Image (spheres, rainbow, N blue to C red):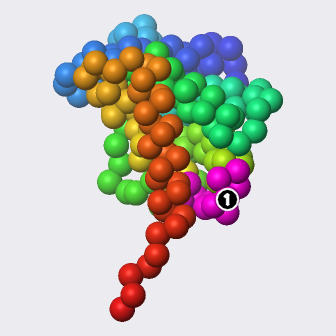
Amino acid sequence: MRSDTERNRRYLIKAAARLFENSPTPVSLAEIARHAEVSTATAYRHFSSVQEILHAFRAEVGSELRDFSARQTTRGMARLEAVSRCWVSLVLEHGGAMAQMRSHRGYLDRLREGTGYLAPQAEALAEPLRQTTEELGLGDLGDEALYLWNALFDPRDILDLIKSGRTEEEAATRLMAALRGALTGWSTAEPPRG
């Protein structure tokens, strides 16, 4: 990619993140272009919609998480906790822009389809979750472990915990405790007899 093309793309993603951080109303692609100091036509050459810019932003944040996870030297629960705490920090760093993404489709459906912005996050978590379930004697829960993690570590809910008075440390600690319980409960639940 040419340097000016890459620069414009970066500017658009950063402008969208800043706008979504504090905007109580929907943001248009033209507005993002104006804040990125590029033409609307340039914005449309890079992204077909605001949602596409948000996907690119979320993929960048997911890549940060994936890179952090790859650098970890711990295993199992210790690694999962470090990666999860990193996620909480990333959510707080990027704030409202992280809470903008909602889909009418479920997490597992999007994950299994290969939705681009979920891939780096799943890569960051797959091995730590597998090691953790093994460490807890639960067996490999596969994608369902990712599903449980995603349900608990939703950016909107992390931001809600912080706004309700929890510190980052308290939020991360409680979410990790809840995840341990969810993984155990999920693994040991008996199907209804009928």
Q: Which residue is mark 1?
A: 137
* Residue at the far left in the pictured view: 25
Mark 1 crowd level (few <14, some 14–19, many ≥20, 10 Å Cα): few
Percent x, y for residue 84? 56, 33
Q: Is residue 158 magenta?
A: no
**Could you say which quadrant of the image residue 138 lies in?**
bottom right
Residue 173 located left or right of residue 81: left
- Residue span colored magenta: 134-145
Classify mark 1: helix, strand or loop. Answer: loop
Number of residue marks:
1
Q: Is residue 136 magenta?
A: yes
* Residue at the far right in the pictured view: 73
Residue displayed at 63% across by 29% down: 82
Kindly tell me whether residue 113 is visible in this rendering: no
Is residue 95 shown above or below 79?
above
Quadrant for the N terminus in the image: top right
* Front residue of 72 and 25: 72
Looking at numbered disc 1 in the image, what kind of residue is underneath it?
A: Gly
Residue displayed at 48% across by 29% down: 173
